[in-house]
Image (cartoon, rainbow, N blue to C red):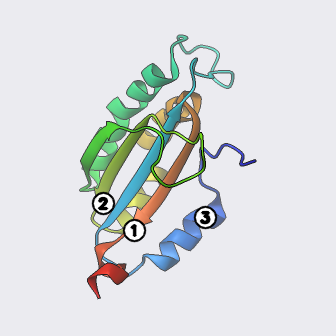
Amino acid sequence: MTTATIEPTAEQLQAFATAFADTGPVTMLNLLRYRAQADYSGHPAATPCSGRQAYARYAAEALACVEGVGGRVVYAGAAGAGVIGPVGEAWDDVLLVEYPGVDAFLDMVRSPRYQACVHHRSAALADSRLVPTSAGRSAYRE
């Protein structure tokens, strides 16, 4: 059984920074599974809502943060059960977000503005994946 993963650890961020340091633009694959009801137990003043609504709160601020470091949303769409993968595993949404490089992504996630909204993301999600990709590292292109 896998456990839900919502926030990166310091070790994961460091490994990402090291592995993608010289690759140029980085596109982050986001797989999102929402809670039925957002978990604002750490922020009791927040207005109750669904996980999807809480993610919309996060996205409204996070998009400005992404654009502020030169990033952009490449794709946002609905997802579902995988064609290849564990039986029963399904995601609600998929996002592809491109950043000019590792430093831009790290600057964003460390910024006070982003830190002020990320609790909505944590409240919204039952599970997630964040996978960095870079065309410069693809074996497909070799």
Disc 3 packing (10 Å; few <14; some 14–19; many ≥20): few
Disc 1 packing (10 Å; few <14; some 14–19; many ≥20): many
Mark 3–mark 2 contact, CB under 8 Å?
A: no
**Does the rendering let one see residue 7?**
yes
**Front residue (pair 29, 17):** 29
Relative image position of residue 140 (x, y in whole percent): 32, 79
Q: Residue furthest bottom?
A: 142
Mark 3 vs mark 1, CA separation in Å: 13 Å
Mark 2–mark 1 contact, CB under 8 Å?
A: yes
Which amino acid type is shown beneath numbered disc 2? Answer: Tyr
Which callout, 3 or 1, points at the residue further toward the start of the chain?
3
Which callout, 3 or 2, points at the residue further toward the start of the chain?
3
Mark 2 vs mark 1, CA separation in Å: 7 Å
Q: Tell me where residue 94 sits by quadrant.
A: top left
Q: Which mark is residue 99?
A: 2
Q: Which residue is mark 1?
A: 102
Relative image position of residue 100 (x, y in whole percent): 27, 65
